[in-house]
Amino acid sequence: MDDEFCRERARAVRAIAEQADPFIKRRLLQLAHHYERRIRLSEGNKNEGDPDRKTPTESQMKSGRGDLA
């Protein structure tokens, strides 16, 4: 899967999650996080050695807040 597909899928899943019940919303947000993680990993392979690139902390990853860029 390419990055653009993952970005679009994460956006769509987050939009659906806004209207879901709490249990389903949590699962959908986890799925969106999965897609975003794939993007970060893909970009990490492209930007390896980039000193300005920030990586999310473990607590941010668990809370779904890996958006440091």
Image (cartoon, rainbow, N blue to C red):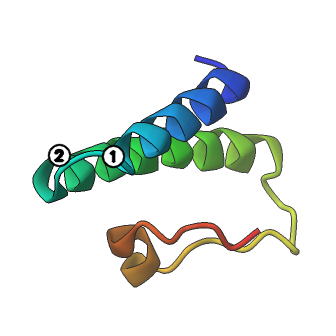
Q: In this view of the protein, can residue 8 be seen by the observer?
A: yes
Point out residue 63 in the picture as x, y percentages from the top left corner. Answer: 36, 74
| Quadrant (top left/top right/bottom left/bottom right) for the C terminus | bottom right
- Position of residue 13 relative to residue 24, above or below, is above
Q: Residue furthest left?
A: 23
Q: Amino acid at mark 1?
A: Gln
Task: Name the residue located 70 percent from the left edge and 50 percent from the top edge.
Answer: 44
Residue 38: in sight, yes or no?
no
Instruction: State the residue at coordinates (17%, 46%).
Output: 24
x and y percentages locating residue 57 in the rendered image = 49, 80
Q: In this image, 13 relative to 27: left or right?
A: right
Residue denoted by label 1: 19
Question: SS for tag 1?
Answer: loop
Tag 2, which secondary structure? helix
Question: For mark 1, does the 10 Å Cα neighbourhood hold few (<14), some (14 to 19), or many (20 or more) residues?
Answer: few
State yes or no: discs 2 and 1 in contact (Cβ < 8 Å).
no
> In the drawing, what numbered circle is on residue 6?
none
Disc with the residue nearer the chain's start (2 vs 1): 1
Q: Residue 55's x, y, as percent?
A: 63, 71
Q: Of residues 69 and 10, which is closer to you in this image?
A: 10
Q: Amino acid at mark 2?
A: Ile
Q: Which residue is mark 2?
A: 24
Residue 67, by quadrant, is bottom right
Residue 54 as seen in the image, left or right of residue 29: right
Kindly indicate the quadrant of the structure image that contains residue 16.
top left
Q: Does residue 4 appear left or right of residue 13 in this picture?
A: right
